Image (cartoon, helix red, strand yellow):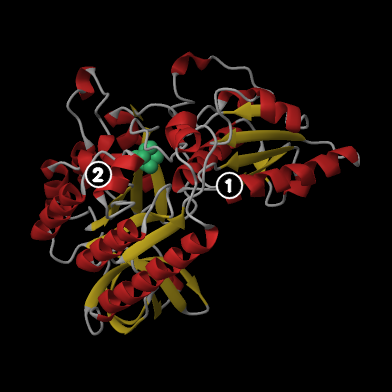
Amino acid sequence: MPAFHIWTLGCQMNVADSLKLAAGLERLGWTESAEDTNADLVVINTCSVRQHAEDRAYGRLHELKRRREAGGQFQVAVMGCMVGPKTDDLQRRFPIVDVWARPQEFDPILTTAGVARDSSEGEFWTETFATPTGVTAYVPVVHGCDKFCTYCIVPLRRGRERSRPVAEVLAEIRHLAEHGTREVTLLGQTVEAYGHDLIGDDAGADLATLFEGIERIDGIARARFLTSYPKDMTDRIIDAVADLPKVCEHFNIPVQSGDDTMLTRMRRGYTVAEYEERVARIRSRMPDVALATDVIVGAPGETDEEFANTVALLERTRFDVIHVAAYSPRPGTFAYRNQEDDVPREVKSARLQVIEALHAESAGAINARMLNRTVEVLVEREDEGRCTGRARGGQLVHFDGHKRLIGKLVDVEVTGATPWSLQARQANALMVL
Ligand code: SF4
């Protein structure tokens, strides 16, 4: 039986794509190999968001090239965000690659795997859903992005926003529930854009429509969603998160900068005041909500004052989690062509450290407030009598427990807190479903 190996870089969307490709290849009679040295087909699922991720893919391709030159008999496929509309340059650099596939375009790889199929069915085989690998699963609901922030490569590589039909998404979630999944995370680059492009029976559907559908799916205990975009976040979606029991009160809303001039330069499409209004609305409905954000430091032209405004916003808002990255110019973007990468490396690094310290302080204080509280944890794994899972706000929680708790909702009392995780003891095991 031929074997394949998939190496996945980057975001949750890529993880979901890799699982779906794996399920498709297995359906064709292939088996998955944990090591690429045993594989007949090696797939690299790439990420372009940062240069570092591309460099890792190049390193692996050079390694595969050496093995091929030493007589290795295997095929190589490259998929994901590094594969744009044109691959001429990459093909010249890496002639060992047998097939290139853009994000969500699985056909070229399946054809390489020896299957000719009718592609008239649209996006891959709609009935080929990923096989769950644990109690949580990612479900892409909207592909691509229409926002074109100046620094971002995603719209150029993943294309325009395309929502999956409501029935298809809910069928996939039912399939996951039947195979042991208890929590789904709905994915989109801007997940609240879900439904904008739907027509016919699905016209008017939005993310809240999916949440309402998930409430009716037996076996699913929780739903999350990633990544939010402030301008697309309607009151209806916020109300659905507040009102529907399965939807976790947990938002990841990248702000990127706390300065209006910088937000305009980034072409983010909102002001600081508009961002803060959305956060206020969320907190008015869900006072204990967990909020995460993303920040870019050292974007082109970022002055000390602009950076200080970002720090001030973060101090005002008190996020549970702050993901911070230093600006990395991406060829092909508007910023790469038109905005000079003029913030010195050491300034970027110093600003990065300021935000990281702010995150540690803010997350530490928020987690400390959970001490002695009872929180509900969905147990994801157990190792030597220690269970690990997540609270509704996404906090990682560790406590002593048996492996039979995996997949169960358990009430625990928080006994210790760091910025990164909570320690707890079991209050009483409670099987909710
Ligand atoms: S919203 Fe902006 S940063 Fe996010 S994926 Fe779209 S273009 Fe990129």
Residue 24: image location, x then y, percent:
55, 33
- Please say if 52 is above or below 112: below
Q: CA distance from mark 2 to mark 1?
A: 37 Å
Quadrant that contains the C terminus: bottom left
Secondary structure category for the residue under label 2: helix
Residue 190 seen in the current view: no
Say whether residue 261 is left or right of residue 298. Answer: left
Residue 221: image location, x then y, percent:
28, 55
Dot 2 amino acid type: Ile
Secondary structure category for the residue under label 1: helix
Residue at image coords 55%, 43%: 47
What is the number of the mark on residue 214? Answer: 2
Residue 418 seen in the current view: yes
Along the line of sight, the residue nearer the viewer: 114 or 267: 267
Dot 1 amino acid type: Gln
Q: Quadrant of ligand 1?
A: top left
Residue at image coords 27%, 52%: 259
Along the line of sight, the residue nearer the viewer: 135 or 99: 99
Residue 239: image location, x then y, percent:
11, 48
Residue 8: image location, x then y, percent:
58, 47
Q: Which residue is mark 1?
A: 51
Along the line of sight, the residue nearer the viewer: 10 or 116: 10
Q: Is mark 2 within 8 Å of ligand 1?
A: no
Q: Is mark 1 within 8 Å of ligand 1?
A: no
- Please say if 267 is above or below 418: above
Report crowding for label 2: few under 14, some 14 to 19, many 20 or more residues within 10 A (C-alpha). many
What is the number of the mark on residue 370? Answer: none
Among the two numbered marks 2 and 1 on one chain, the one whose residue lies closer to the N terminus: 1
